[in-house]
């Protein structure tokens, strides 16, 4: 009955979005401000600018059918941005992250360099980029600061299918084709997965740490954005997803489309992503097709309080006839005491075809500056 109630609430919110009058949504405003912070920094010391974000999570989840319980407190991410303007047309941007508070031998966390790139303006509308950068995929991969999205944890589709957060090293160009239409096109390092990793794309991320680069990848993305509506999509291709280490696998193609709509106090996010992996190896375990989608309506009864529900479905072995699909229902709230600080609560129900189900609640606090 709880799942039915969540779906009914989602349906009501979606219907309300379709009928509301279009105005600027507060989440879209925050995302624009975060994008500006990444370009200019949260604070300025001459040509050097700094910023950052962080999030603390409490998860209380119960498992069944072999799924584990989870009852823990975790400072999931602490991130610092540092940028430097060499001139009006040449800029450097970096991002350093500590995950799970402690890193080192036997510790649960990692220290990761997620961005370190140089932008060089070619013209007023086009910019060349080279270095280590976040790929322009989905809704969250480039903009994932806690105040900009609903829910304590990032949605599972963008975590396990895209997979967020995903950065590579390479070069390319990005910019505006029109006032509403933007693009990005890059050649960059690629994934390195194999049968030992069940051809899972998330475990294939090399994070540019002595990354094998015998087979590069390319990503092209476009986005159309006007007040209240954003629609985007991307394609990525890699000739050999195993970097030559697995003769039973071959090329990989990722496609994704997403949309964000804001109408008055109502909002809607939706995304679909799918991988196609070539070769007998991925096909033998059902990993030749991996896909997922979610829809997330939201409602803000007052300026600094938002309610949301989300339905997600994903499968990293969608090419198999085995029970591997996962479904999750989320419902919860965000409260912004300040537009750059957020407190979150949500309840989730995850159903796995394998029978390993999990449910419970999450609490979180996050910020960006």
Image (spheres, helix red, strand yellow):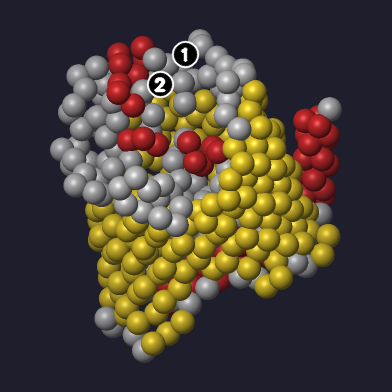
Question: Residue 100 in the image: x percent, y percent?
Answer: 46, 53
Residue tagged 1: 320
Cα separation between marks 2 and 1: 7 Å
Camera-side residue: 41 or 67?
A: 67
Camera-side residue: 201 or 217?
A: 201
Looking at the rendered structure, the secondary structure element under dot 2 is loop
Query: Where is the N terminus found, in terms of image quarters?
Result: top right
**149 sits left or right of 282 in the view:** right
Callout 1 environment at 10 Å: few (<14), some (14 to 19), or many (20+)? some
Quarter occupied by residue 2 = top right
Question: Residue 269 in the image: x percent, y percent?
Answer: 64, 47
Q: Can residue 201 be seen at all in this image of the molecule?
A: yes
Residue tagged 2: 287
Quarter occupied by residue 83 = bottom left
Callout 2 environment at 10 Å: few (<14), some (14 to 19), or many (20+)? many
Mark 2 vs 1: CB contact within 8 A: yes
Above or below 203: residue 97: below
Res. 191 mark? none
């Amino acid at each position: 009955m709880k799942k039915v109630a969540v779906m009914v609430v989602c349906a009501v919110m979606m219907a309300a979005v379709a009928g509301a009058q279009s105005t600027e949504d507060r989440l879209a405003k925050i995302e624009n401000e975060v994008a500006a912070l990444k370009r200019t920094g949260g604070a300025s010391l001459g040509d050097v600018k700094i910023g950052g974000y962080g999030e603390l999570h409490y998860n209380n989840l119960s498992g069944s059918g072999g799924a584990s319980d989870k009852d823990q407190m975790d400072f999931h991410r602490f991130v610092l941005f540092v940028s430097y303007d060499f001139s009006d047309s040449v800029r450097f941007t970096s991002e350093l992250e500590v995950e799970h508070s402690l890193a080192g031998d036997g510790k649960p966390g990692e220290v990761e360099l997620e961005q370190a790139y140089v932008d060089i303006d070619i013209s007023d509308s086009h910019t060349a980029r080279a270095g280590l950068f976040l790929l322009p995929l989905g809704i969250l991969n480039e903009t994932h600061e806690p105040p900009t999205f609903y829910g304590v944890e990032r949605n599972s589709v963008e975590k396990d299918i895209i997979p967020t957060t995903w950065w590579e090293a390479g070069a390319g160009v990005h910019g505006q084709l029109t006032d509403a239409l933007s693009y990005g096109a890059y050649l960059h390092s690629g994934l390195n997965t194999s049968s030992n990793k069940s051809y899972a794309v998330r475990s294939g991320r090399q994070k540019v740490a002595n990354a094998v680069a015998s087979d590069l990848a390319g990503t092209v993305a476009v986005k159309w954005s006007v007040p209240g509506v954003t629609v985007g999509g991307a394609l990525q291709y890699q000739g050999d997803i195993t970097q030559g280490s697995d003769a039973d696998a071959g090329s990989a193609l990722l496609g994704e489309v997403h949309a964000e709509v804001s109408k008055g106090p109502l909002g809607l996010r939706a995304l679909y992503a799918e991988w196609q992996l070539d070769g007998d190896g991925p096909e033998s375990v059902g990993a030749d097709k991996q896909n997922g989608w979610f829809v997330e309506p939201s409602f803000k009864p007052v300026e600094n309080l938002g309610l949301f529900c989300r339905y997600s479905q994903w499968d990293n072995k969608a090419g198999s006839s085995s029970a591997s699909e996962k479904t999750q229902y989320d419902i919860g709230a965000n409260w912004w005491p300040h537009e750059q600080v957020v407190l979150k609560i949500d309840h989730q129900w995850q159903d796995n075809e394998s029978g390993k189900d999990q449910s419970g609640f999450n609490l979180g606090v996050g910020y960006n500056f």
